[in-house]
Image: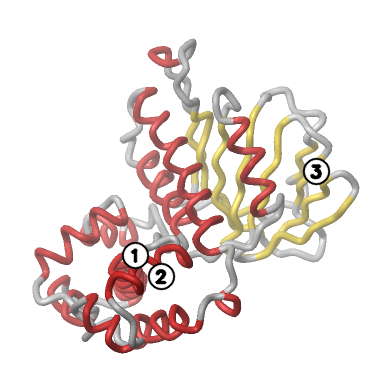
Amino acid sequence: MSNKYGVYGFRFLDTLNSSFYQLFAVGYQNITDSSYDWDGLKRKDGPLLLFQYTISGFGNIEIDGDVHQVDAGSAFMVEIPSNHRYYLPANSENWEFYFILLRPINIQKEWTELIKLIGKVPKIPEDSPPIIFLKSAYFTASKNQITDGFRASSIVYQFIMELFRYSTAYKKEKEIWPEKVVQAVHFLEEDYVSLQSLEELANRVELSKYHFTRLFKKTTGLSPMEYLTKVRMEKAVKLLRNTNLTIEEIARKIGYSNGSYFIKVFREWIGFSPGEFRLGKDLAYLNELRFD
């Protein structure tokens, strides 16, 4: 197995018997062996909560007798122990995925609510915040930077909050969004390089700045300028991943006048600087990263 893959487990005494959230393990694997087969009623390491997200290939998961194919862009959420089984089927050459295992302490209620919102086998874009955060958590673990229970607890909380943010902001289909919001999103996604102000965007959709901002935020979960930043970060991730452009060149390509401001914004949204992101890719610790 290539060294970009791995599994990291955590047992921190400083938060073991407290009210803090408990991170049990995080991993990135590429399974090619048909012996890979986990029965949720036979495992002895529970109680645990498992979120697993497929990058390439596919696997199967049976939940209460129903079989789901979990292919690229799909996740599953299960409790251990429970009536489920996930495995590499005979017709799949590989199953590449990230996963995170949590103790249910203090987070069970939120987990149950999330399953109500997005389902046990949700489709989630790979460039969405929860998946990007999951990948960044693995990258952090692979660099031995999760050194105490408090850091681990914050990772659990932030990951769950990213899932909630995704479920509320992006579960809504664009087809049912108000026409003015759809128009604005189109402008943001097409003209993200040149758009500079909220006033410009509000004028394009012929609404007052106040009314437009309130409508956009209520519909998408983000302010118009947050959405603009989101689009720019998506583009930046792809450019960092797939090109050799300098940080300054990428900054200009996505609409920023200089690299230093781009670095600041990227770190705020992604959790790493563009250079750290690219270094992780070059070292093969992290194939791909964030964003929503």
Relative to 246, is 213 on the left or the right? right
Classify mark 3: helix, strand or loop.
strand
Q: Pick whichever of labels 1 and 2 is earlier in the sequence.
A: 2
Q: Amino acid at mark 2?
A: Phe
Read off the residue under disc 1: 223
Residues at badges 1 and 2 in contact (C-beta under 8 Å)? yes
Relative to 177, is 256 on the left or the right? left
Read off the residue under disc 2: 216
Q: What is the CA distance from the residue labelled 1 to the residue labelled 2?
A: 6 Å
Q: Nearer the viewer, mark 3 or mark 2?
A: 2
- The local crowd at label 1, few if under 14, some if 14 to 19, many if 20 or more residues have their Cα within 10 Å, is some
Classify mark 2: helix, strand or loop.
helix
Q: Pick whichever of labels 3 and 2 is earlier in the sequence.
A: 3
Q: Amino acid at mark 1?
A: Ser
Read off the residue under disc 3: 85
How far across and down, in percent of the image, does residue 250 sit?
Answer: 21, 76
Quadrant housing residue 79: top right
Q: What is the CA distance from the residue labelled 1 to the residue labelled 3?
A: 41 Å
In this view of the protein, which residue sits in the foreground, 194 or 51? 194
Q: Residue at x 19, y 79 (%)?
A: 196
How far across and down, in percent of the image, does residue 264 sit?
Answer: 16, 58
Classify mark 1: helix, strand or loop.
loop
Q: Nearer the viewer, mark 1 or mark 3?
A: 1
Q: Residue at x 75, y 64 (%)?
A: 92
Q: Is residue 252 visible?
A: yes
Q: Amino acid at mark 3?
A: Arg
